[in-house]
């Protein structure tokens, strides 16, 4: 194989258990690894845990256990977490492994031998959360902006790496290689950083203060600074310098990181590599933070605004969580996420657009073609679909190459929507009733199955198991991207299995069981009485927040809601139990008809009515404000 691809995640500190921030970068890395495997690249995907340093030592102490045992325990939690999220890493490195320590010693030795290390006393502001000295400029109101704590003033004897010496060289390198740090915003940030002196880097800690680390080869009284130790994992995992993996993968190394660890990766790491005489990595890909919807800060446990991806995976399925993280975030920028949005994405893209199409085409194949993929005879009306379907892999490849992942997935979903339109326009269920429509019916069903084959392969990096299920449900095998450039590779005559599970069952979400937000079928326009603005102004509509919801005993359709209007609390009974689970409503803003005469329903006095939209099939969807607005606000 000639093409190689090597992707790494940051190695995660074991002072914290896996959370959404870790999961995000790891899912992106997994997407890229799976994508490149399917695209014929010889791929290596590395993740792991960062286990040395003061922060970990303190955490182990706090837990009252031996640091190694502590690391073993938490590191295992990361492995387990990646299993839950179906992460396909090829290697999991731990910085306490001997294979890693040996390479750290070797690289430090090389920098030392080059004359780029000296001993000095240092005084500065240290943030244990970041595990580095911060400059005055990096502080916001005297605090570390990432950890919201004031750093400690420290003075100690350290070994230093002559980093400043490499500043001009690095600046030139980044200028000449526009893709080295991407997206561009972060590249500019690094160039700005390098526009001023960066100083030398303290690369050791006295063992007396931090005993938990790798001893320096030339002075056993000091251990390597945790960042220098950690960065080297990207090469130690490949068996630097002699292993075939190092030779194959290092030249194409792509690191994925969060923006908070830009400086160590974009400045410390390339200068250390240069001094040690090791070639640089190829790309540094910088991602933004995931935030809760109203939060300014990134999500993190210490900030108490976490969504738990593992809980979400249990509730909605691993593939739905993966898809959501990839499709609803813009790589490189901060993105807001929330469970409610995950559910919306799940229902719209997965359950409706993809899942329904699959079950509809399967039903028609089972009923009208004996469950066998028919042989198509294409017509002009099919050309557009075929052209889009075969061009898809090229478009997606190009977008993923530029890390525009959500756009790549959106391009695939647009094609899914095109397949749905084709299905509706060609109306195979009508063709089935027409004795002259059999051949056309076969072609239409074949084309939808073939389109779904292409879609399933392109969605596989995002949703490995559901994508395979799409194919299994159509009786198809696995394919690679090379099989997507020509239409017609799903073999006519293929038998589809008679039974299949629903791809994305809506009920699993515990959310509204509404169907596709399709336009309701047109009814005879009812005779509606016109009212004047004065009539309308008699209705007082207000924004209310649901505080609590519960089922009304003995009434399948009713929920009792407690609503907050800012200045008062109301009880309202609504006929929405078929579409909403009580536990999903608290926190939601709804519109209340506030001056409706109270009415007694099942013994409960209902003080108003909440608004919902109804489609042609009688499905209800609650109506709410488009953006967040104060509870109690008037609606005109
Ligand atoms: N151990 C170092 C990395 C060493 S790599 C040689 C480290 N570990 S970490 O566990 O604290 O964080 C790892 C990554 O998780 C960072 O890239 C950080 O940006 C990312 N995230 C943590 N919380 C995050 C969000 N809420 N959103 C997105 N990513 C964030 O730093």
Image (cartoon, rainbow, N blue to C red):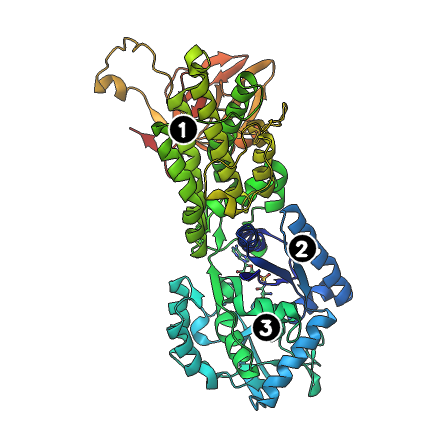
Q: Could you give the CA–CA distance between mark 2 and mark 1, rounded to whole angstroms?
A: 50 Å
Q: Residue at x 63, y 56 (%)?
A: 89
* Quarter of the rendered image showing ligand 1: bottom right
Position above or below: 510 against 185: above
For the residues labelled 3 and 1, the Cα–Cα distance comes to 60 Å
Judge: label 3 CB < 8 Å from ligand 1: yes
Position above or below: 496 against 295: above
185 or 270: nearer the eye?
270
* Screen quadrant of the C terminus: top left
Can residue 429 be seen here? The reply is yes
Q: Residues within 10 Å of mark 2 (few under 14, many from 20)?
A: many
Q: Position of residue 224 (x, y in %)?
A: 65, 78
User: What SS does tag 3 mark?
Assistant: helix
The residue under label 1 is 378
Residue sitting at x 50%, y 64%: 260
Q: Determine the residue positioned at 63% across, 23% down.
A: 498
Look at mark 3 in the image and give the residue it sits on: 227
Viewer can see residue 205: no
Residue at 39 percent of width and 78 percent of height: 172
């Amino acid at each position: 194989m000639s093409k190689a691809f090597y992707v790494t995640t940051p190695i995660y500190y074991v002072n914290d258990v896996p959370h959404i921030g870790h999961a995000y970068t790891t899912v992106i890395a997994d997407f890229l690894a799976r994508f490149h495997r399917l695209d014929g690249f010889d791929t290596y995907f590395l993740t792991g845990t960062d286990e040395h340093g003061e922060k970990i030592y303190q955490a182990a102490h706090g837990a009252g256990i031996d640091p190694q045992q502590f690391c073993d325990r938490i590191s295992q939690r990361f492995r387990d977490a990646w299993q839950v999220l179906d992460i396909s890493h090829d290697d999991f490195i731990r910085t306490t492994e001997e294979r890693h320590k040996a390479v750290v010693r070797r690289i430090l030795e090389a920098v030392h031998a080059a004359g780029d290390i000296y001993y000095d006393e240092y005084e500065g502001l240290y943030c244990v959360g970041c595990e580095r000295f911060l400059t005055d400029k990096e502080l916001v109101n005297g605090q570390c902006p990432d950890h919201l704590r004031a750093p400690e003033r420290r003075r100690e004897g350290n070994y230093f790496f002559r980093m400043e010496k490499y500043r001009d060289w690095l600046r030139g390198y980044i200028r000449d290689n526009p893709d080295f740090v991407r997206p561009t915003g972060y590249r500019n940030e690094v160039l700005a950083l390098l526009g001023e002196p960066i100083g030398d880097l303290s690369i050791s800690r006295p063992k007396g203060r931090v005993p938990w680390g790798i001893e320096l080869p030339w002075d056993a009284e000091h251990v390597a600074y945790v960042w220098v130790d950690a960065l080297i994992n990207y090469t130690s995992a490949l068996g630097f310098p002699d292993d075939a993996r190092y030779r194959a993968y290092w030249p194409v190394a792509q690191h994925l990181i969060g923006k908070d660890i830009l400086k160590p990766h974009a400045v410390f790491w390339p200068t250390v590599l240069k001094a040690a005489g090791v070639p640089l990595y190829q790309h540094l890909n910088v991602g933004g933070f995931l935030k809760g919807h109203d939060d300014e800060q990134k999500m993190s446990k210490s900030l108490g605004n976490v969504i738990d991806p593992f809980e979400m995976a249990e509730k909605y399925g691993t593939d739905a969580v993966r898809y959501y993280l990839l499709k609803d975030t813009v790589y490189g920028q901060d993105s807001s996420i929330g469970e409610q949005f995950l559910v919306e994405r799940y229902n719209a893209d997965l359950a409706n657009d993809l899942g329904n199409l699959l079950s509809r085409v399967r039903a028609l194949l089972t009923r009208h073609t004996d469950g066998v993929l028919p042989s198509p005879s294409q017509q002009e009306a099919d050309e557009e679909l075929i052209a889009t379907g075969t061009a898809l892999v090229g478009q997606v490849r190009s977008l993923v190459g530029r890390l525009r992942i959500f756009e790549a997935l959106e391009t695939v979903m647009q094609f899914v929507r095109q397949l749905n339109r084709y299905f509706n326009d060609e109306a195979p269920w009508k063709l089935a009733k027409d004795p002259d429509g059999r051949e056309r019916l076969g072609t239409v069903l074949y084309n939808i199955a073939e389109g779904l084959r292409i879609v399933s392969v392109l969605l596989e990096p995002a949703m490995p198991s559901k994508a395979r299920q799409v194919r299994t449900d159509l009786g198809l095998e696995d394919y690679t991207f090379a099989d997507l450039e020509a239409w017609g590779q799903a073999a006519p005559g293929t038998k589809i299995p008679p039974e299949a599970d629903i791809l994305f069952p809506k009920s699993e979400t515990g959310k509204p069981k509404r169907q596709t937000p399709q336009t309701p079928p047109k009814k005879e326009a009812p005779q509606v009485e016109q009212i004047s603005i004065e009539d309308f102004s008699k209705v007082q509509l207000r924004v209310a927040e649901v505080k609590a919801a519960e089922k009304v005993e003995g009434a399948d359709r009713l929920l009792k809601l407690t609503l907050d209007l800012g200045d008062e609390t109301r009880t309202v009974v609504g006929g929405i139990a078929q579409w909403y689970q009580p536990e999903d409503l608290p926190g939601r803003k709804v519109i209340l008809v506030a001056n409706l005469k109270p009415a007694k329903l099942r013994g409960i006095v209902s003080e108003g009515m909440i608004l919902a939209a109804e489609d042609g099939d009688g499905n209800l969807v609650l109506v709410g404000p488009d953006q967040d607005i104060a509870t109690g606000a008037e609606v005109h």
